[in-house]
Image: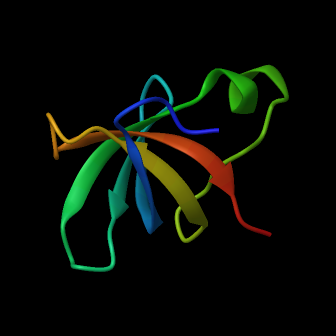
């Protein structure tokens, strides 16, 4: 469930960075820095480069986001 004022968009993971940070490419070719949501950390969901993910972003900062879901 999305937070108030945020929106969700799909993307593709380009690279994995330290501290569960990831570089994600959006469909409009922008690259954003994303971190994992708490549920993905809690359930040990592994994210690898090349995975398709759903990210949540706020309208205030278009350079950062949160990975909410990894598509199968």
Identify which residue is drawn at 28% across, 38% down: 58
Quadrant containing the C terminus is bottom right
Would residue 65 be found to the left or right of residue 71 on screen?
Answer: left
Total labels: the figure holds: 0
Q: According to the image, what is the colour scheme of the structure?
A: rainbow
Q: Nearer the viewer, residue 21 or 54?
A: 54
Residue 63 location in percent, x, y?
17, 44
Tell me the quarter of the image containing the N terminus. Answer: top right
* Residue 35 occupies quadrant: top left
Where residue 62 appears, x then y in whole percent? 16, 46
Q: Farthest residue to the front: give it.
A: 4
- Left or right of 17: which side holds 68? right
Q: Is residue 6 left or right of residue 59?
A: right
Residue drawn at (21%, 77%) of the image? 29
The residue lying toward the viewer, choosing from 2 and 43, is 2
Farthest residue toward the right?
Answer: 43
For residue 26, which quarter of the picture? Answer: bottom left
Residue shown at 22% from the left, 60% from the top: 31
In the depicted structure, whether residue 33 falls above or below residue 10: above
Q: Residue at x 25, y 51 (%)?
A: 32
Lateral position of residue 43 relative to residue 17, left or right: right
């Amino acid at each position: 469930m999305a937070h108030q004022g945020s929106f969700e968009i799909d993307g593709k993971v380009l690279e994995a960075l330290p501290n569960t940070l990831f570089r994600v490419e959006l469909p409009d070719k922008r690259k954003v820095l994303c971190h994992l949501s708490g549920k993905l950390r809690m359930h040990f969901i592994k994210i690898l480069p090349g995975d398709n993910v759903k990210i949540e972003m706020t309208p205030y900062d278009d350079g950062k986001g949160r990975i909410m879901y990894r598509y199968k």
